Image (tube, rainbow, N blue to C red):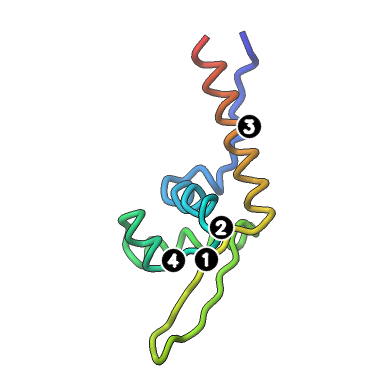
């Protein structure tokens, strides 16, 4: 049996909303705040909290600007975020394989 370990599962990414953000951004160059909010079906406050945690970890970059008088927030996955997400998926794959034997 393969070694069973959850140590490589990144707690920052593993939260449901944060995982959704990362999965969405991995295929998108950039996503608007409202686009993510709609895709993930979360509240503005909930998304803000999770984005802050991802930003503090260096996994996403957030750019705030104004379009006219309306705030406009764009989120991008950083290169560190791409690497962390790849490592997360690999760790999850190993865990699933060890559990399915």
Q: Earlier in the sequence, mark 1 or mark 2?
A: 2
Residues under labels 4 and 3: Cα distance?
Answer: 27 Å
Relative to 68, is 98 above or below? above
Q: Secondary structure at mark 1?
A: strand
Q: Earlier in the sequence, mark 3 or mark 2?
A: 3
The residue that appears at 61% across and 24% down in the rendered structure is 5
Mark number, residue 75: 1
Relative to 84, is 97 above or below? above
Instruction: Say few, some or many: other residues with alpha carbon within 10 Å of mark 3 (under 14 / 14 to 19 / 20 or more).
Output: few
Q: Nearer the viewer, mark 4 or mark 1?
A: 1
Instruction: Say few, some or many: other residues with alpha carbon within 10 Å of mark 4 (under 14 / 14 to 19 / 20 or more).
Output: some
Name the image quarter holding residue 76: bottom right
Q: Secondary structure at mark 3?
A: loop
Q: Nearer the viewer, mark 3 or mark 2?
A: 2
Q: Earlier in the sequence, mark 4 or mark 3?
A: 3
Task: Name the residue that disc number 3 marks.
Answer: 7
Residues under labels 4 and 2: Cα distance?
Answer: 10 Å
User: Do labels 4 and 1 touch, CB within 8 Å?
Assistant: no
Name the image quarter holding residue 40: bottom left
User: Do labels 3 and 2 touch, CB within 8 Å?
Assistant: no
Mark number, residue 48: 4
- Where's residue 67, x and y in %? 43, 86
Relative to 80, is 52 above or below? below
Residues under labels 4 and 1: Cα distance?
Answer: 11 Å
Q: Earlier in the sequence, mark 4 or mark 2?
A: 4
- Where's residue 39, x and y in %? 35, 56
């Amino acid at each position: 049996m393969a070694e069973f370990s959850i140590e490589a599962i990144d707690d920052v990414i593993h939260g449901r909303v944060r995982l959704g953000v990362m999965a969405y951004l991995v295929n998108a160059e950039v996503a608007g705040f409202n686009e993510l909010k709609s895709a993930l079906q979360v509240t503005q406050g909930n998304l803000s909290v999770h984005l802050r945690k991802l930003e503090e970890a260096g996994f996403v970059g957030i750019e705030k600007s104004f379009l006219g008088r309306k705030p406009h927030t764009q989120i991008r996955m950083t290169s560190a975020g791409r690497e962390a997400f790849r490592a997360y998926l690999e760790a999850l794959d190993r865990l699933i394989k060890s559990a399915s034997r």
